[in-house]
Image (spheres, rainbow, N blue to C red):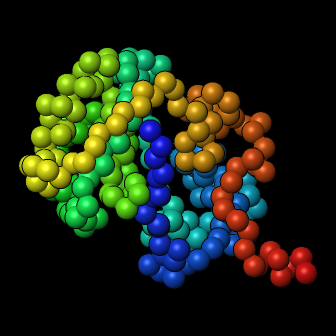
Amino acid sequence: MSVTFRPFPLPLISPTGMKELDEQERLIVRHLVRDPRESDNGIGEATGVNVRTVGRKRQRLEQAGILSYFTHLDLSARGTGQFGARHLYIIKFRIGITYKQLLQDIQREPFVRSIFTELIFESHIAEIDGNLAMLLFIDGADETSIVQTVQEQLIPSLLRNHGANSIESVNTIRVLAPVRTMRNYIQPVNMHAGYIKKDWPDDAIYVGEEGKEKEEKES
């Protein structure tokens, strides 16, 4: 099967109008990639940026939706052992199912723990050759339990929400092990005790392209 994935484009400009990070913001974010729990004081000491500036810039990035924090709890066989298998499901919808419809479906999920919260590790809306699709990383105790969950709960739920003929195709890929997440976290290489290793070089932590500000200084 030959499939081309084109994720929906993210806004190039945030709601606040921010386009790029300045040099101080890059230092702050790079340090937060290493340790998201670090205080403003700690970041200031490590980067040389004034602590008040750290707090102001950090808050600005958070409010703009550019900087977010996540906690990852490994429930796989390598972690707590709850789940022994993970599949990537590619659910392709027929022409006519819209991006707005899929978002509304997601927004209807109750604000309580559900079977989807429990079993879907990660999900994305995508486009496959003009059709909308959902990319779902689904966990289960084993291969069979994942198939049962999809066939007995997930697919019927999607068909109820979008129509009996709304799904054009379903494809699966067995996921063996995570490697890189959120660009900088390479679990088998640079992670130890929940953090990026201290000897991992700053230059290897990517926080976006350097903008015109540095180019003008160097010219």
Specify whether 203 is left or right of 166.
Answer: right
Q: Is residue 152 above or below residue 158?
A: above
> Looking at this rendering, what residue extends furthest in the right direction?
219
Residue 46 % position (x, y): 73, 53
Residue 130 % position (x, y): 37, 62
- Quarter of the image for the C terminus: give it: bottom right
Give me the residue at 68% from left, 30% from top: 189
- Residue 217 placement: quadrant: bottom right
Specify whether 79 is left or right of 49.
Answer: left
Give me the residue at 38% from left, 27% from top: 86
- In this orientation, which residue lies closer to the viewer: 9 or 116? 9
- Residue 43 placement: quadrant: bottom right
Give me the residue at 41% from left, 57% from top: 129
- In this orientation, which residue lies closer to the viewer: 154 or 11? 154
- Quarter of the image for the N terminus: give it: top left
Q: Is residue 17 above or below residue 140?
A: below
Is residue 121 something that shows in the picture?
A: no
Give me the residue at 48% from left, 43% from top: 2
Q: Is residue 85 above or below residue 121?
A: above
Residue 113 % position (x, y): 19, 40
Specify whether 23 is left or right of 58.
Answer: right
Residue 209 % position (x, y): 70, 65
